[in-house]
Image (cartoon, grey):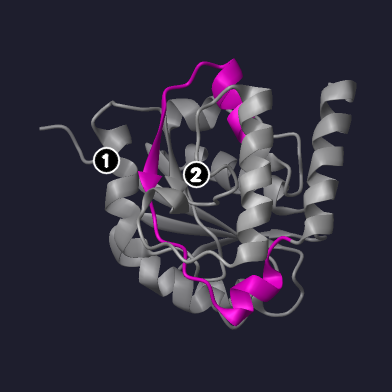
Amino acid sequence: MASPPCVVVVIPAFREPTMVGGVVESIRPHVDRVVVVDDGSGDGTGDAARRAGATVLTHIANRGQGASLMTGIRYALTKGADIILTMDADGQHDPQEITAMIEPILTGKADIALGSRFLRSGHLVPLPRKALLVAATWYTRMVSGLDLTDTHNGFRAMSRHAASTIKLTQDRMAHASEILDQVAELELRYVEVPVTIRYTDYSLAKGQRAMNGLRILVDLWVGKVLG
């Protein structure tokens, strides 16, 4: 009988000392290993994650979410991960949905599963956030050609093949669009999976703003020109 797949969650974390411990504890029952990348927080984020049972990798200086994901994904691959999920450190993602996220990978239907908050009825996205997300989705559709409903969702699942093939060069938030560009370029099979995003005053305060969206577009343009 084949052994069950090794499922690892990678969580990039920057200044989340009050949240990351609870997030790790809620995820651990659903996977084999939780890897938290403390992105130069300097405030006890890594210690809180470690106490909760995560493997903690540390960036001495803040490098950004994209760089943190690459650090965590590379580590997970060295530890034999068959499926790698990415989730946020602020508690927005529901660990109960991990099973649905990895199902397309387990059954061979896809190389990467992408969470979408817009495939579930009754989603309550604050209007300013929704406008930014819709703009990002249309931009990504035009650039990558992928037919997606939610292009900046940090909840994903990747097969070992996909995780080994995707190489992020965007250290910060533009990595989300870069992943999709590479899905298209590498012709990876993808599906969207309905997920719930839990909005709180805390998560909204830490989320993307319009100026950050402009910075993402600039980062992507510079990356394409220099690449």
Give the position of the C terminus as an image quadrant.
top right
Question: Which stretch appears magenta?
Answer: 179-208
Front-lying residue, 168 or 58: 168
Label 1 crowd (10 A; few <14 / some 14-19 / many >=20): some
The Cα atoms of the two marked residues, 1 and 2, are separated by 19 Å
- Left or right, residue 173 beside residue 93: right
Query: Which residue is found at the position 72% from the left and 49% from the top?
Result: 173
Q: Position of residue 158 (x, y in %)?
A: 44, 36
Displayed quadrant of residue 178: top right
| Looking at the image, residue 171 lies above or below residue 191 | below
Residue at which label 2 appears: 76
Q: Amino acid at mark 1?
A: Glu
Label 2 crowd (10 A; few <14 / some 14-19 / many >=20): many
Residue at which label 1 appears: 103
Q: Position of residue 47 (x, y in %)?
A: 60, 77
Q: Position of residue 126 (x, y in %)?
A: 58, 67
- Residue 191 magenta-highlighted: yes
| Looking at the image, residue 171 lies above or below residue 107 | below
Front-lying residue, 129 or 23: 129
